[in-house]
Image: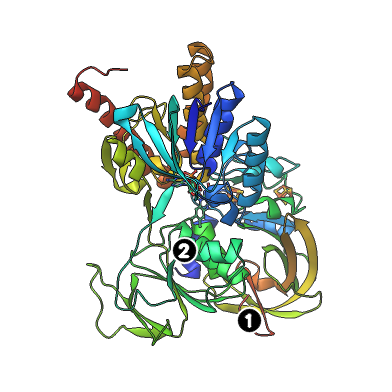
Amino acid sequence: MRESEILEKIRSSPGYPSRERFIKGPVCVIECPEEIPCDPCSQVCPFEAIDVGRPITNLPKLIEDRCTGCGLCITACPGLAIFVVNLNYSPGEASISMPYEFLPLPDVGQQVEMLNREGSYVCKGRIVRVNEGEDHTRVVTVAVPKEFYEHARGIKLISGKVR
Amino acid sequence: MDAELSVIGSGPAGLSAAIESAKYGVRVELIDENILPGGQLFKQIHKFFGSKKHYAGVRGYDIGWRLLREAEDAKVNIRLNTTVWGIFQSSNNRIGLFDQQRVFFSKPKRLVIATGATENPLSFPGSTLPGVMGAGAVQTMMNIHRVLPGRRVLMVGAGNVGLIVSYQLLQAGAEVAAVVEAMPKIGGYLVHALKLMRTGVPILTSHTVLEARGDKEVESAVIASLDKDCRIVKGSEKELDVDLVCLAVGLKPDAELCRMLGCGFTYVPFLGGRVPIHNEDMETTIPGVYVAGDVSGVEEASVAMEEGRLAGISVAESLGYISEGEAEKEKDEIKERLRDFRIGPFGSPRQEGKDKILTEYKRWFSNEGKRDS
Ligand SMILES: Cc1cc2nc3c(=O)[nH]c(=O)nc-3n(C[C@H](O)[C@H](O)[C@H](O)COP(=O)(O)OP(=O)(O)OC[C@H]3O[C@@H](n4cnc5c(N)ncnc54)[C@H](O)[C@@H]3O)c2cc1C
Ligand code: SF4
Ligand code: SF4
């Protein structure tokens, strides 16, 4: 499947923030566009910014003005489908926080290659934070040039291995 | 003293059935041929989907531990290393067991068969070479015994099992050269596919494995693309340098015991093929014999747990441990949750399958004449 096709599908789901919301700062991006029986994202959010309701196969809906970008939902999602994007990380960069379940962990400051949803190279990135996270799921935050905020979703450690 | 209920298989379905009936006072024995209880759960190192009630977001093995603790609290008698090799309807569903030392029999009043599923094979030149194995075996070696069965892998099948096991292979340090899928689209959940794709693993739809090559073990594999009619596109063959070909091409109910017992069967492709006919309480066409989990149609652990609970409550009810009214209330809640699970593009074909099984159940007894209990 192509990146454009996947992004199209994700953008038209109720979990994807609007451009206006992205501009305001850190926000949760839910990339879960299929009706699967799952709802921990909605249970964990302290601000009730994600709604699944009943039946449990409903698509998760982001109530974007309630979301603070706290990132709690990232590790709660068993599908590893939630990211937090901060378009205002620095004048030229956006930051993307994502779940990470591989070893070794990257180091803060390390240069990495960013891949998109179909596994193709997008841009260089710089690790800016590595959090312990919950239950063996770490949260890694990467700074990337602003224009790639919608595309950079995977990390490849330059040291060699595809990760 | 013989148990009132024997539950065969200690996966999520069997554990739940045993816990639920024991809670109401039924004397339960839980039997498994493995040296550890838990069925598939202890291989599942990923976080499960579902709702809070089903431990969503909890890793499979942690769900296993929780269920085991509940079973112990409910005083379920767990008998491991013991295979049930036969059930005999002619002698009131007497079961034959083998505990690695002796063969013996027992005659519980009720039976829950929760034996899970078996993997489908696939044959192609080289498929008998060491290094070609099922996803279940790969998972067991890697996640239970901590042995990595290969360094560079070709995964065959992009259903949830193929996608999840590929991801787990990456976590264990292997490289996944590609996932090939004969269908034109990915069968599993997109979220599982995406977590694999964004590490750079290609998922090749409309592709199949043609051959595994190697002298004594797999050294490479040949893949090719398929056209609309599933014919190999000439000239599209490609040889991949791999030492493991992992097959994840579907599961089917492990219903040998039901077959031996003479249970009625029906064919439901979306639930893994031939499944034992059962009613809403999970009772088969043989009175007193229940099924739950993958053996009654391949779905997932959350469904297996709910079906196990249903069977457990029904057994407690049929033995007089709970009133009909109380049982109905409990069962209705479970049935509602099960219906909720079976909505949407992935769920509704399963709901249709389950509906067909219920219809077949009714037809079975109208054909057989009156049901004798
Ligand atoms: C890779 C993979 C990923 C999965 N991911 C998920 C997920 O994310 N979420 C989810 O909900 N589900 C998931 N599942 C599905 C889930 O594991 C199964 O649906 C579930 O385990 C079925 O439970 P069960 O109790 O029916 O069978 P099992 O767990 O298979 O247990 C059957 C037990 O019966 C025993 N047994 C069989 N025959 C006999 C006999 N004759 N005598 C004695 N013992 C016997 C076996 O040893 C086994 O322990 C996944 C499955 C796989 C393979
Ligand atoms: S980032 Fe925080 S506030 Fe936003 S949806 Fe997730 S948990 Fe809720
Ligand atoms: S927890 Fe993740 S996989 Fe589950 S519904 Fe929410 S976003 Fe989708």
Q: Nearer the viewer, residue B64 or B362?
A: B64
Q: What residue type is labelled 1?
A: Lys
The C terminus of chain B lies in quadrant = top left
Q: Nearer the viewer, residue B219 or B178?
A: B219
Of all chains, the one bearing label 1 is A
Is residue A52 toward the left or the right of residue B115 in the image? right
Residue B334, position as x, y percentages in the image: 51, 28
Q: Left or right of A50: which side holds B108? A: left
Picture coordinates of residue B186, whole percent (x, y): 41, 62
Could you tell me which chain the residue with mark 2 belongs to?
B
> Which residue is labeled 1 in the image?
A161
Cβ at disc 2 under 8 Å from ligand 1: yes
Residue beneath the point at 23% across and 72% down = B231
| Numbered tag placed on residue B203 in the rendering | none
The image shows residue B267 at horizontal and vertical percentages of 26, 43
Q: What's under tag 2, amino acid-wise?
A: Ala
- B181 or A30, which lies in front? B181
Q: In which quarter of the image is residue B75?
A: top right
In the picture, residue B228 is in which quadrant? bottom left
Above or below: residue B74 compared with residue B211: above
Q: Which mark is residue B135?
A: 2
